[in-house]
Amino acid sequence: MFDSYNDGECPQCKLAPGPAVAMELNREDHWECPVCHLQMLGSGGQVLILRERGSGNFKEPRVLAPHSIVGAFMCRQSTEDPWGSGGYFRSAEDLRTFLEQEVDAPDSTED
Ligand SMILES: [Zn+2]
């Protein structure tokens, strides 16, 4: 069953086989995945998944998202309001489509 709640782990890396990756706070105060650089915003009951990837500029000392984010509802960033929600994800496929088609491609040499 699709889990639309987030516990501070990268939702994109979670779709792939392999270990879960904890998001970390970057210098813009966004949560960012150290592997695919997906960014999330928020800390309360809801997190927004951003369309723009981070640049790996993390805070020192490291601040890990699983300490702050527990059971937050995942929403996509609105196209009109960068601080607003554009709705939730109905399924893993819905989340995957958003990550593949709306979020910037990961900065990588793979295709
Ligand atoms: Zn990731």
Image (spheres, grey):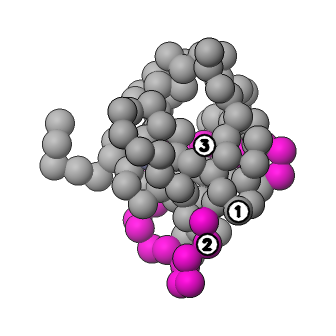
Q: Is residue 90 above or below residue 105?
A: above
Residue at 60% x, 43% y is 49
Q: Nearer the viewer, residue 22 or 104?
A: 22
Compared across the picture, whether 29 is left or right of 85 comes to left
Read off the residue under disc 1: 67
Compared across the picture, whether 95 is left or right of 110 comes to right
Q: Nearer the viewer, residue 51 or 37?
A: 37
Kind of residue at disc 1: His
- Specify the quadrant that holds the N terminus: top right
Q: Is label 2 or label 3 in front?
A: 2
Is label 2 in contact with label 3 (beta carbons under 8 Å)? Answer: no
Residue at 48% x, 37% y is 14
Read off the residue under disc 2: 63
Kind of residue at disc 2: Val
Which secondary structure lies at badge 2? loop
Residues shaded magenta: 44-64
Which secondary structure lies at badge 1? helix
Kind of residue at disc 3: Ile
Residue at 47% x, 46% y is 20
Image label count: 3
Q: Is label 1 or label 2 in front?
A: 1
Q: Is residue 21 above or below residue 96?
A: below
Most common secondary structure along the magenta stretch: loop
Image coordinates for residue 101, horizontal then vertical, percent: 41, 28
Q: Is residue 55 visible?
A: yes
Q: Nearer the viewer, residue 63 or 83?
A: 63
Read off the residue under disc 3: 49
Is label 1 in contact with label 2 (beta carbons under 8 Å)? Answer: yes
